[in-house]
């Protein structure tokens, strides 16, 4: 289907003051606050979690040294999707001098559609974080209380009891992050770096993290989260998160949230010989996902 003159009757009228509806600003590149971007040159990417060694045992005098094995734990796969959208303008609309006005307006609308899809795709990683039907490499949902480890135990990156964002739940989340273990059960030094929230929680987050004194009390206690330098990257609002009371903490674990770019966005235009229509297309290929679930701690809200 092409955009024809009959669909744009007002565009042809003299004395038209303004056209509106295509000039809105857009939420752009919000994924960059969460995901590390890498390039890809294949149909999919895989990242393998390796398990290190267990705790070193004491060696008795004259006894043989103990040997340990390192194994592959699980594989995270990123399968790139092709995102594309196009529109066309009829030959008659071009002849009637609508080409310049239409092409500039609708290419902007096309760009906004492509950008919106990318943000929805990125946010879906967190929007599905508590859904067991969306498993990551270790077979569990992104935020779970029972992520398996190679050593036979498990770890959790979700509050034991789901809670809304408040002083208690935020502090408990930071405590739990400091207790993360690796694939062999050894404690690892991770810390929360950034709070990720939907728009509904931005005022709560500001009170929790920006006030000098303890929020919500008449005491003269200090705001421990602020005074101790916890969450040094502050908080970020993601406008594409769909759960109004879920919150997430991004940690400093390497190889966590990943965004692979297979083909950067490309815009093309061509004329159709049969119809004479001018066609515009935008296309890109990318994927979003998570390798190591230790990169995040979350709560779905009470």
Image (spheres, grey):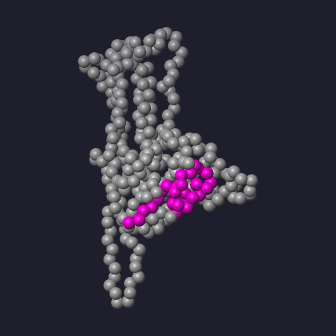
Q: How many numbered discs? A: 0
Which quadrant of the view contains residue 121? top left
- As drawn, is 80 to the left or to the right of 300? left
Q: Quadrant of the N terminus?
A: top left
Residue 253 visible in rendering:
no
Which residue appears farthest toward the left when viewing the image?
Answer: 274
Q: What is the residue that sits farthest to the top in this orientation?
A: 14
Is residue 30 in view? yes
46 sits to left or right of 224: left
Residue at x-position 34% and y-position 61%: 73
Q: Residue 165 colored magenta? A: yes
- Residue at x-position 51% and y-position 29%: 24
Can you give x and y, in whole percent of width and height, for residue 34 in the image?
Answer: 47, 48
Q: Dividing the picture into quarters, in which one does residue 237 lie?
A: top right
In this picture, is 102 found above or below 154? Answer: above
Is residue 139 or residue 287 the one in the foreground? 139
Q: Nearer the viewer, residue 266 or 210?
A: 210
Q: The magenta stretch spans which residues?
A: 152-178
How far across and how far down the image is residue 246, in percent? 53, 47
108 in relation to 195, above or below = above
Residue 83 within the segment the image draws in magenta:
no
* Observer-nearest of 58 and 39: 58
In front here: 97 or 278?
Answer: 278
Where does residue 59 sit, x and y in percent of width and height? Answer: 38, 84
Residue 18 in the image: state x and y as whole percent.
53, 18
31 sits to left or right of 170? left
At horizontal 56% and vertical 55% (from top left) the residue drawn is 231
* Residue shown at the point (49%, 47%) measured from the top left: 33
């Amino acid at each position: 289907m092409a955009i024809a003159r009959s669909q744009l009757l007002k565009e042809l009228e003299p004395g038209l003051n303004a056209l509106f509806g295509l000039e809105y600003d857009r939420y752009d590149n919000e994924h960059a606050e969460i995901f590390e971007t890498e390039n890809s040159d294949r149909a999919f990417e895989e990242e393998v979690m390796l398990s290190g060694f267990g705790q070193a045992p004491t060696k008795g005098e004259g006894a043989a040294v103990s040997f340990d094995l390192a194994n592959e734990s699980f594989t995270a796969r990123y399968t790139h999707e092709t995102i594309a959208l196009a529109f066309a303008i009829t030959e008659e609309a071009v002849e009637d001098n609508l080409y310049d006005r239409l092409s500039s307006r609708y290419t902007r609308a096309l760009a906004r559609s492509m950008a919106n899809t990318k943000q929805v795709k990125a946010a879906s990683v967190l929007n599905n974080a508590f859904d067991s039907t969306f498993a990551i490499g270790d077979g569990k949902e992104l935020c779970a209380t029972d992520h398996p480890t190679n050593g036979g135990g498990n770890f959790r990156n979700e509050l034991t009891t789901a809670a809304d964002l408040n002083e208690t739940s935020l502090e408990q989340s930071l405590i739990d992050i400091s207790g993360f273990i690796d694939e062999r059960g050894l404690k690892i030094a991770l810390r929360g770096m950034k709070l990720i929230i939907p728009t509904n929680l931005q005022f709560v987050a500001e009170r929790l993290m920006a006030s000098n004194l303890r929020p919500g009390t008449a005491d003269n206690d200090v705001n421990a989260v602020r005074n101790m330098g916890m969450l040094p990257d502050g908080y970020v609002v993601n406008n594409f998160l769909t759960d109004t009371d879920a919150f997430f903490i991004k940690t400093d674990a390497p190889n966590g949230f990943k965004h692979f770019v297979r083909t950067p966005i490309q815009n093309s235009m061509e004329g159709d010989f049969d119809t004479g229509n001018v066609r515009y297309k935008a296309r890109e290929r990318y994927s979003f996902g998570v390798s190591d679930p230790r990169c995040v701690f979350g709560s779905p809200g009470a």
